[in-house]
């Protein structure tokens, strides 16, 4: 609801007559999309940790760096849409037909649509060369394009409301991430993959259905952020794509997997390209690449502890959970528009309305 409010407000600010307290005196329209502005910024500003511009890179290289750094920032903003898979075990609709698939699709469509519209409408009221975007703001909150838009429109009180919602959003995001991390840690403990038994035994324990010790351990790790600023025949049938009760079908999966692999490798390798622009930034480099050696070290330590140096049996561990796969409970695939009769009938209209409702609710 808040994002929809942002979209509507940014749009109206661009077309209505400005208030008397506004910084401008004519409707903005598409002024910030006309010359000399463009979709691509021809100048890339290299900034320090305080977002102060140190020097600028122009030409094709500047455009490429601007597009790439923006792309990586946007990619990390979308992280979290896969959380629906981590919460699937607690879903009451898990046995429903393709419920998790529908949930994942809805989240993707909603987030991409709302984020894109929010940024598009905000670009009508805030120019790309605004000084607050380019390192001249006096606070972190002042760097928000939505805050800039309402302040320059003569509505500073709305900015306080926006900041309050942003803080609440960040708080709920932290809680959500902590929940997911706790669930993963507790699951690893149940599998005996969290180190010595005296630690694993405690991480398994629950009180009133809550893995309290896993929550406390996750919370302790979160404090690191303050160091910086910023089987059976039935189960076998559930994997046969030709079975009518197969719960999930992903067409062209090998193409999707290849695309995902290439995209992830490129993103990981060039995520920290901004750190190599003079002057070289050690904090940016560490923030961008510290996860790589940590991840590799954890994998190596786990395999050495579990299998020793018998390299042939490394990477052979696999989950047995797939033997408990829930098969589809209905032959009607959820989210698919299938009319029961030909032509325009009352029944077909009811099916269409129900299909729209399933995608919107």
Image: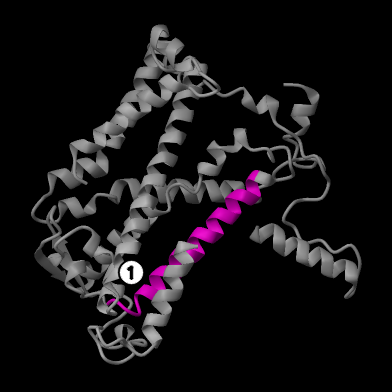
Q: Position of residue 43 (x, y in %)?
A: 19, 72
- Is 206 situated left or right of 235 in this image? left
Secondary structure mostly seen in the magenta stretch: helix
Please provide the residue range marked out in magenta.
100-126
Q: Residue at x 37, y 46 (%)?
A: 171
Residue nearest the observer in this picture, 348 or 314: 348
Look at the picture and state if 29 lies above or below 149: below
Residue nearest the observer in this picture, 320 or 105: 105
Please tell me in which quadrant of the rendered image residue 345 appears.
bottom right
Q: Position of residue 52 (x, y in %)?
A: 11, 61
Point out the image quarter for the C terminus.
Answer: bottom right
Disc 1: which residue: 158
Is residue 353 something that shows in the picture?
yes
Is residue 145 something that shows in the picture?
no
* Residue 44 part of the magenta segment: no
Q: Residue at x 26, y 74 (%)?
A: 151
Look at the picture and state if 143 lies above or below 190: below
- Crowd band around label 1 with a 10 angstrom C-alpha radius: few (<14), some (14–19), many (20+): some
Q: Position of residue 272 (x, y in %)?
A: 24, 49
Q: SS class of the residue under badge 1? A: helix
- Is 351 situated left or right of 26 in this image? right
Residue nearest the observer in this picture, 49 or 360: 360
Look at the picture and state if 2 lies above or below 82: below
Q: Residue at x 50, y 62 (%)?
A: 1
- Is 261 situated left or right of 50 in this image? right
Please tell me in which quadrant of the rendered image residue 89 appears.
top right
Q: Residue at x 82, y 63 (%)?
A: 351
The colour style of the image is one colour
């Amino acid at each position: 609801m808040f994002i929809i409010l942002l979209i509507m407000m940014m749009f109206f600010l661009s077309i209505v007559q400005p208030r008397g307290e506004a910084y401008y005196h004519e409707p903005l329209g598409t002024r910030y999309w006309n010359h000399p502005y463009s979709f691509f910024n021809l100048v890339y500003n290299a900034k320090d940790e305080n977002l102060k511009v140190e020097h600028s890179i122009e030409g094709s290289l500047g455009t490429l760096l601007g597009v790439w750094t923006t792309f990586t920032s946007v990619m990390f903003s979308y992280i979290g849409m896969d959380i629906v898979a981590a919460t699937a075990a607690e879903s009451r609709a898990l046995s429903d037909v393709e419920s998790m698939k529908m949930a994942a699709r809805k989240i993707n469509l909603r987030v991409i649509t709302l984020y894109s519209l929010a940024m598009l409408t905000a670009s009508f009221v805030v120019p790309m060369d605004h000084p607050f975007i380019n390192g001249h703001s006096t606070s972190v909150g002042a760097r928000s394009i939505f805050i800039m838009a309402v302040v320059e429109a003569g509505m500073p009180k709305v900015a306080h409301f926006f900041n309050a919602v942003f803080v609440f959003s960040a708080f709920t995001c932290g809680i959500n991430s902590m929940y997911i991390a706790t669930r993963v840690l507790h699951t690893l403990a149940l599998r005996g993959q969290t180190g010595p038994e005296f630690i694993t035994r405690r991480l398994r324990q629950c009180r009133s259905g809550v893995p309290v010790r896993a929550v406390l351990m996750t919370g302790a790790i979160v404090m690191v952020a303050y160091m910086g600023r910023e089987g059976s025949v039935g189960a076998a049938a559930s994997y046969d794509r030709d079975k009518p009760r197969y719960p999930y079908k992903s067409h062209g999966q090998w193409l999707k997997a290849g695309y995902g692999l290439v995209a992830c490798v490129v993103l990981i390798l060039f995520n920290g390209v901004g750190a190599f622009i003079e002057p070289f930034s050690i904090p940016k480099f560490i923030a961008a690449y510290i996860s790589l050696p940590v991840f590799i070290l954890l994998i190596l330590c786990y395999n050495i502890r579990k299998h020793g140096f018998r390299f042939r049996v490394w990477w052979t561990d696999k989950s047995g959970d797939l033997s408990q796969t829930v098969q589809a409970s209905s032959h009607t695939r959820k989210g698919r528009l299938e009319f029961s009769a030909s032509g325009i009938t009352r029944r077909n209209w009811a099916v269409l309305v129900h299909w729209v409702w399933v995608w919107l609710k």
